[in-house]
Image (tube, grey):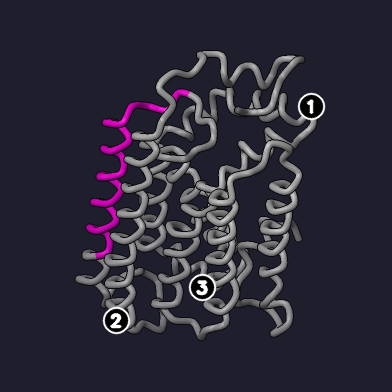
Amino acid sequence: MTIAGQLAHAGHGTAGSAWSPLFPVVLLAAGYVLAAVREPRGWDHRRTAAWLVGCALLAVAVGPLAQLPDDPRGHMAQHLLLGMLAPLGLVFGAPVTLLLRVAPPPVRRAVGRLLGARPLHLLAHPVTAALLSTGGLALVLLTPLYAAAERHSALHHALHLHYVAAGYLFAWSLAGPDPAPRRPGLAVRIGALLGAAAGHAVLAKYLYAHAETLPPGLSDRDPEAFRAAAQLMYYGGDLAELLLAVALFATWYNRPRSRPAHSIKRFASPKDEALT
């Protein structure tokens, strides 16, 4: 199983294999620390701490929380950790910048080409990332996808992967320290954050008000548990969005006042250098 697949796996299989997702999380943490130690100019310890906090939150989501009996509150806590809180730590670990500093030239050129690719420009736009994050959650909770994921472990794993990827993309598009080609101005990013926060709050209230029928397709329903999950979604989402807003304004305030226009392209040149 790949690292991504193991990361998504939670609470299925035998008692021993149920804890297997912790191993790829440990690999992610260890690999980052080794790369940080190799960085010749010295890597910011705050970046390392942020990455390790993100990994720790992933470990809680795919480890202890996954061992709880099936319960909407546990599933919502997993969503908050996988899709909102852990990505913040991972993004502010600046793993792409670290990779560009320690990787050999061919890898840096490949990363530079990826950063300049048009599909990434579309995915990295804050509005697109907000739709993938908040819109993806709405699709799960307002359609039979939630019930289907309860019955099919592959879909369950895929949804967890989506939460992590969409949450990472959203945090990176708004305030990530790693290079982000054609990142829009502050007003667009604030608008995307406010839109996502509003959508998240409305979705939580709608789930609370319709806990007797949402998510559709469930055969064994516990409305009170879903109401509690909706409350967790509402207040936990507020916390994550507040942290992201603080990070967004801090990143904007501390941004470099001048930056060469060719700063991305030079990664793809034969004489590419590490990111400064």
Could you say whether the residue bearing mark 2 is in a helix, strand or loop?
Answer: helix
Q: Name the residue located 46 percent from the left edge and 57 percent from the top edge.
A: 83
- The amino acid sitting under disc 2 is Pro
* Magenta segment includes 235: no
Residue numbers of the magenta segment: 182-204
Q: Which residue is mark 3?
A: 150
Q: Position of residue 4 (x, y in %)?
A: 66, 56
Taking the image as shown, residue 106 lies to the left or right of residue 173, namely right
Q: Residue at x 68, y 33 (%)?
A: 100
Which of the 4 quarters of the picture holds residue 249? top left
User: Residue 95: x, y in percent?
Assistant: 61, 43
Residue placed at 50% from the left, 48% from the top?
168
Residue 197 shown in magenta: yes
Q: Which residue is disc 2 drawn over?
A: 223
Of 276 and 122, the residue lying toward us: 276
Is 13 located above or below residue 183 in the figure? below
Disc 3 residue type? Glu
Q: Counting residues from the N terminus, which is met first, the one under dot 1 or under dot 3?
A: 1
Q: Are marks 1 and 3 in contact (CB under 8 Å)?
A: no
Residue underneath mark 1: 106
Judging from the image, what secondary structure is the residue with disc 1 in?
helix
Dominant secondary-structure state across the stretch colored magenta: helix
| Upstream in sequence: badge 1 or badge 2 | 1
Disc nearest the viewer among 1 and 3: 1
Query: Is residue 105 positioned above or below 168 on the image?
Result: above
Q: Amino acid at mark 1?
A: Pro
Specify the quadrant of the image occupied by residue 14: bottom right
| Placement of 51 over or under 116, stated as above or below | below
